Image: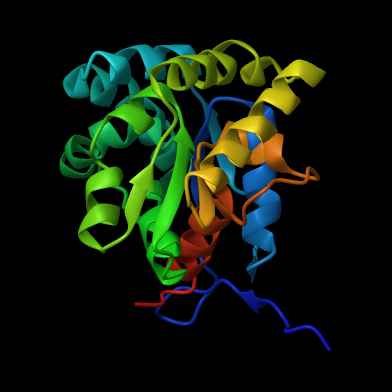
Amino acid sequence: MPEERRTARSTEGGPMPTFGLIADTPQVADAYRRAITGNVALASAPLVEAVDGQCVHELAQTLDAEGLADYLLPAIDRLQRKGASLVALTSVTAHLAHRLLRERAELPIIDVSDAVLKATVSRRDRAIFLLGSNPTMRQRFLKTPIILSHIAVITPNSEGKDWLGDIIRHELKGGDVTPETVRGFQDMVEKGRDESAQSVVLASSDLCLLAQGRKLALPIVSSIDAHARAIASALMGDS
């Protein structure tokens, strides 16, 4: 028989209060709900605050951590006023502002980049192919901890980074994916395999959705699945 899901409870043994998600599309929020409830039985549905993914990407692209924190903090505050006891920011790109948000927000924030790092390291691969937004692929916040864990990080060339970043920002956010995009994405993963990567780390919720139900040349580390496990653990009060 499959393992029974646990029911989220506080450390005092009572029901766990509602938690909040900050997401930029309904599709991402729905995917998170499904992934979290696959790990733990929730007493209530998560609260969701929508943000503008384009704005998040533009601020991250220019390394404007202060501006990004200023933009995201009101969403956290709104979730707190609605009764959330912790919050999960679904954007890996927004990691740039996590330190500032943790300093300024009253709610605990479950970090997606930490979850992706742990899931990646746990595979014990020698090399991984990292795909995500342009800032995620170019900046060091996720790559450096993986490298320090003795895992080589492979990313697409500059042209590939730009193509994938544009696809995430302008096509995947709308939900209408062309066959050319699907084939280009699959070809990109094949190139990562050919460069000796043993898995592909999808450090983007939009790419995780794109990969669902599709055959890829490498095993997947999904930021949504990794983050959902971390959220479920936090709801259970696990250390």
Residue 239: quarter of image: bottom left
Which residue is drawn at the image coordinates 73% and 84% (left, top)?
3
Q: With 191 as the anchor, is 26 left or right in this view?
A: right
**Residue 233 visible somewhere in the drawing:** yes
Residue found at x 44% / y 26% = 133
- Residue 41: x and y, percent? 67, 68
**Residue 78, horizontal then vertical, whole percent:** 42, 31
Rendering coords of residue 100 (x, y %): 17, 36
Which residue occupies the foreground of this view, 211 or 192? Answer: 192
What is the total number of numbered labels drawn onto the structure image?
0
Looking at the picture, the colour scheme in use is rainbow
Task: Relative to 217, say whether 138 is above or below.
Answer: above
* Pick the front one: 202 or 236: 202
Would residue 18 be seen by someone viewing this image from the given angle?
Answer: no
What is the quadrant of the N terminus in the image?
bottom right
Q: Is residue 5 left or right of residue 143?
A: right
Q: Residue at x 41, y 36 (%)?
A: 155
Residue at 59% across, 10% down: 170
Outermost residue toward the bottom in this view: 1
Where 50 falls versus 2 (above or below)?
A: above
Q: Is residue 22 found left or right of 134 in the rendered image?
A: right
Quarter-of-image position of residue 102: top left
Q: Nearer the viewer, residue 117 or 80?
A: 117
**Residue 207 position in % (x across, y down):** 60, 34
Against 204, is 226 above or below? Answer: below
